[in-house]
Image (cartoon, helix red, strand yellow):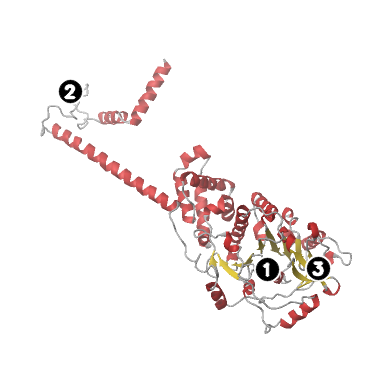
Amino acid sequence: MDGIFVGGGGAGYGERQVLDLKYANRHGLIAGATGTGKTVTLQILAEGFSEAGVPVFLSDVKGDLSGLAKAGSEGFKLHEAFVGRAATIGFEDYRYRDTPAVFWDLFGAQGHPVRTTVAEMGPLLIARLLELTEAQEGVLNIAFRLSDEQGLPLLDLKDLQALLVWVGENAKELSLRYGNVSTASVGAIQRRLLVLETQGGTSLFGEPALELADLMRLAPDGRGQVNILAADTLMASPRLYATFLLWLLSELFEDLPEVGDPDKPKLVFFFDEAHLLFDGAPKALVDKVEQVARLIRSKGVGVYFISQNPDDIPEDILGQLGNRVQHALRAFTARDKKALRMAAETYRPNPDFDTETAIREVGVGEAVTSMLERKGIPGIVQRTLIRPPSSQLGPISAEDRVALMAASPLAGKYDTAVDRASAYEMLKQRAESAARAAEEAENGAGGAEEAPDEMIREYNRARRYDPTPKAAPRTSGTRRGSSRYSKPESIGEALGQAVLKELSGTTGKRIVRGILGSIFKAR
């Protein structure tokens, strides 16, 4: 199998439009207004990649894509329409079939739990997730640096919260080494972490962490595993959704080896609602996405962005998306017309029709397509009738989902969270040890001082006689018989004794050295 049959183009839709697997890792775009058929296009591409032995990861924003796990049926209301369309476009081996699907869910309700550690996500993505300012991000970077230097693993949110408390308590000392550490910034980060907790972000961080190899499995029959992330609830926290998917892309980029230009991808990644990744994103983050998109294809990973409008994607990234399926765009406003014109200009023209007009006029289930051809050259744009799906169109039932999760090859591996000793427990242990040591030192010092004080009191009261007492009273030299330890007779004497006692300590010695140094220096 050299390509994925996408649909029929040309006159009468009889020309096969194929996505060449050799160029599938050069990324792609699925765009179009709401209700024009983007979800079905995503579904048939996922089916095609799986059939070719390529694992797929996709996010199910509306819940419709769970139907990939179940074969379509002849009793479906669109059965006749699907069969007719298959005949029109020359899809001769059309049949109903499911895909080997595995469900995932950050919250663990509709799929296997997905977790990562705070350390793996890193300060840049966490700062993006928490919407931190530049100064707050700097403090977060210091916390991560301390985690490495002090051997304090950051696994879950409570580890990061505990480390930030320690940073705040030692802000003055840390500022001398790392730059200004503002307790106000620490407090702001803690508040943002609290907001993340209320949004369910606690579920994302912890162990066992997701192993990327579990996303790249093949079914026993050689088909690629289709990983479906339940994102309907997750979409209530769009920043969490976008940050998680970007982290997953980054992990793939960092962990997978270079493979050059393989005959087919090792994994295809579909990023639905892609505009969420770039809305309000700082330039550093957009640059990181561009870097990943540009270089990850050499790791054998294809990334396909799904969004309503091509201009939702930054221009530098849009230029790297070689395989394109453009569903209808509606041009009601001046901005819409400009976006439509710009979208049309990115395609290689077809002399048989005007691309801008075609994008505006294509119906539901129809699209303007352009796939990379030999040597990676963009193909001539075609009006294409998208092939019907082989799996169920629409979501599966809750009972079917539970049964599929129970039969999953990964059942039980990620279901139970593990909380091993990390930064929170280590810092707590350090604090308890320091408190015990301080208490023991205080008790020991108190016991050592108590006995001499009692001896002195007995001596002063003439109730005890010792020819050479270790703490015998000393004469002051100004008043005969006055004792350093006896009750002072005036406020001035009391102050004098307090100063004398202070000067006899370490701090006092430093003061004396300072005074004497000044005197000798003055001479």
Q: Can you give x and y, in whole percent of width and height, for residue 120 in the image?
A: 55, 53
Q: Where is 296 relative to 224, above or below?
A: above
Mark whose residue sits in front, 2 or 1: 1
Residue holding disc 1: 46
- Residue sticking out furthest to the top: 523
User: What amino acid type is highlighted by mark number 2?
Assistant: Arg
Q: Earlier in the sequence, mark 1 or mark 3?
A: 1
> Closer to the N terminus: mark 2 or mark 3?
3
Residue with the mark numbered 3:
360
- Residue 454: % across, % down: 17, 37
User: Gap in Å between the C-alphas at discs 1 and 3?
Assistant: 26 Å
Examine the image and state in which quarter residue 260 appears.
Answer: bottom right
- Under circle 1, the secondary element is helix
Task: Judge from the rendering whether residue 430 lies leftward or rightward of residue 156; answer left or right.
Answer: left
Q: Residue furthest front?
A: 221
The CA span between labels 2 and 3 is: 110 Å
